[in-house]
Amino acid sequence: MSNWIPFENASYLAEQAFLIAEDDAAVALEKTVITVYTGKGGKQHLKGSGLVRNALVVELSEENDDLDLILDFGSEFKYRLTAPKIIAGKVFAPDVKSTLQFAPTSPWNQIPEAEFEILMGKLELLNS
């Protein structure tokens, strides 16, 4: 990947973040933060984490093979990470939240505001 990250090296708190499936089922992440840093060869990288109820991620994964991640940093800064690498905890009690880590596997795509609003209107949030 070439340098496709439009942010400076720093940590950024997302206003909203969601794991979403093809069928528009979704799980909200809390306290989602991305960190942009420069690695070897001067190339920028991105990694992130957020809190999630693992039981809901399991439920979301039961019917869907690939999950995407939507990140909303406010204003026009809304992005979709297609099938990111996801590492999550192994506690599946219904009320337990743990850290979910993610990293992109391809460049992220900026979502225009109008398209973002349509997407948000279609999502069916899992919360049971």
Image: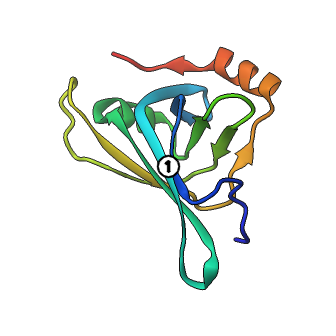
Q: Residue furthest bottom?
A: 41
Q: Which residue is mark 1?
A: 34
| Up/down of 108 relative to 28, above or below | below
Q: Residue at x 57, y 60 (%)?
A: 9
Which quadrant: the N terminus? bottom right
Badge 1 amino acid: Ile
Tell which of 36 and 81 is nearer to you.
36
Name the quadrant containing residue 70: top right
Task: Please tell me which residue is depicted at 75% across the width and 32% down the height of the picture.
Answer: 76
Residue 96, image x, y percentages: 20, 30
Would you say 103 lies left or right of 97 here? right
Chosen colour scheme: rainbow
From the viewer's perspective, is 115 left or right of 43? right
Q: Quadrant of residue 68?
A: top right
Number of residues whose C-alpha sits closer than 10 Å to that of mark 1, classed few (under 14), some (14–19) or many (20 or more): some
Figure label count? 1
Q: Position of residue 34 (x, y in %)?
A: 50, 49
- Residue 86, horizontal then vertical, whole percent: 43, 53
For residue 23, side relative to residue 117 (left or right): left
Residue closer to the observer: 126 or 7: 7
Residue drawn 53% across and 28% down? 16
Q: Secondary structure at mark 1?
A: strand
Estimate the x, y position of residue 123 in percent, counting from the top left.
Answer: 60, 20
Residue 57 vertical position relative to residue 114 in the rendered view, above or below: below
For this view, does 17 lie left or right of residue 95? right
**Quarter of the image where the C terminus is located:** top left
Q: Residue at x 63, y 49 (%)?
A: 82
